[in-house]
Image (cartoon, rainbow, N blue to C red):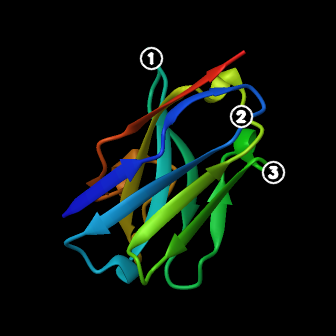
Amino acid sequence: VQLQASGGGLVQAGGSLRLSCAASGLTFSSYNMGWFRQAPGKEREFVARIRSPGGSTDYTDSVKGRFTISRDNAKNTVYLQMNSLKPEDTAVYYCAAQYYSSVLNYRSPLSYRYWGQGTQVTVSS
């Protein structure tokens, strides 16, 4: 199984980025997909999740109204559209796959079976 995250970069505050995560080696439609982030010296934190099937979404409060998670099952890809970026959004962003029937807390990294390598997002003030 491989999750390949891309799309990170350096952007000014108020700008936008779109992260992508291409999955291979798994039945993509059988997995909820999440995005987490980790800033230097901090724990990895939940950002967003999209379920499968159905496509319902969950977000951490600090990104609601600014970030949008989506998925394209035909392309085995999950996206994170990030608008109105703030310096506090600076982190390494990771995509992760959670089996659809998991009963574990979706906000916990422990509930995700597979992880991508991370992509750096830096927001300058």
Specify the amino acid type for callout 1. Answer: Pro
Q: Is residue 92 above or below residue 23?
A: above
Q: Is residue 105 visible?
A: no
Quadrant of the image for the N terminus?
bottom left
Q: Residue at x 59, y 67 (%)?
A: 70
How far is the residue under mark 2 from the one under mark 1? Answer: 18 Å
Q: Secondary structure at mark 2?
A: loop
Residue marked by disc 1:
40
Q: Quadrant of residue 101?
A: bottom left
Left or right: where 79 falls relative to 86 = left
Q: Residue at x 30, y 51 (%)?
A: 115
Residue in front for this viewpoint, 7 or 91: 7
Residue marked by disc 3:
65
Specify the amino acid type for callout 2. Answer: Leu
Left or right: where 34 falls relative to 31 = right
Q: Is residue 22 above or below residue 15?
A: below
> Which of the two labelled residues, at mark 3 and mark 1, occupies the earlier sequence position?
1
> Which of the two labelled residues, at mark 2 and mark 3, occupies the earlier sequence position?
3
Q: Is residue 68 above or below residue 14?
A: below
Residue marked by disc 2:
85
Left or right: where 92 falls relative to 18 = left
Q: Is residue 8 visible?
A: yes
